[in-house]
Image (cartoon, grey):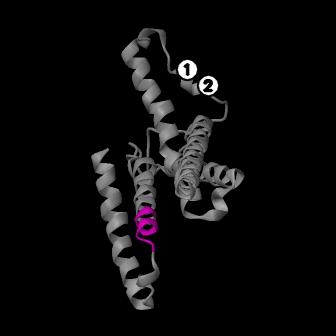
Amino acid sequence: MFEVIVFGVVFGGVPWVVLRGIFLLWSKNYKHISIIRELLVMAFVIYCLAVIRVTIFSLHPSAGFGQSGTPSVNIIPFAEMFRGFHPNHFSLGYMIRHLESNLIGNILLLLPLGFFLPMLWSKFRSFKRTVVIGILSSLSIETVQYILAYLGLSSGRASDIDDVILNSIGVIIGYMVFQAISCGIKCFRKYSTFTKVD
């Protein structure tokens, strides 16, 4: 996890700060920027690079590096996930590891996306738009993984409909978190206004 964060900061955060700083100084528009928004955008850039690091750059070349093949594809929801519970490995430790890697990991992967999109761009305050972008992002990741595996540039991962479903659930949860925080802020401001009037 630490390595992923460092990767995102070095290849995402630092270049973003430098390029964004140069742009603002050149346009002389730095007096009108929102520091909070700039920090959120930088966090989003770091997050995107971290996702790429986890899903793409973590793939190791296969034994037949450079040789094309036919990677596995699962289009039956949760078929592969429950197939992993083999009787010989049906222990509490195995179940926890299995749930962490297949359920929790895939849900958490795109959860921040569902939060950042409506937070940074008003057009994504629409639930439908945010979920569509989340699904397209997940499908893009699975497609790239499939292509890399097909070309023999990676191994160990298959394109799986489970990942798309769980990633989408993560986006929905992220959107709900944004809505909850947004609603909380509005209620707080409304309460503060009533208090001042009284």
Q: Is 38 contained in the magenta span?
A: yes
Amino acid type, callout 1: Arg
| Neighbours of disc 1 within 10 Å: few (<14), some (14-19), many (20+) | few
In the image, residue 89 above or below residue 110: above
Is residue 147 visible in the rendered structure shown here? no
- Specify the quadrant that holds the C terminus: bottom right
Label 2–label 1 contact, CB within 8 A: yes
Residue 108 makes an appearance in the image: yes
Q: Quadrant of residue 83?
A: top right
Q: Residues within 10 Å of mark 2 (few under 14, many from 20)?
A: few
User: What is the secondary structure assignment of the residue under circle 1?
Assistant: helix
Q: Position of residue 186 (x, y in %)?
A: 58, 53
Find disc 1 in the rendering and name its residue: 83
> Is residue 150 toward the left or the right of residue 9 in the image?
right
The residue at 41%/90% (across/down) is: 26
Q: Which contiguous range is marked in magenta?
A: 34-40
Q: What label does residue 9 carry, if any?
A: none
Instruction: Please name the predominant secondary structure of the magenta segment in the image.
Output: helix
Return the residue nearer the eye: 144 or 6. Answer: 6
Disc 2 designates what residue? 79
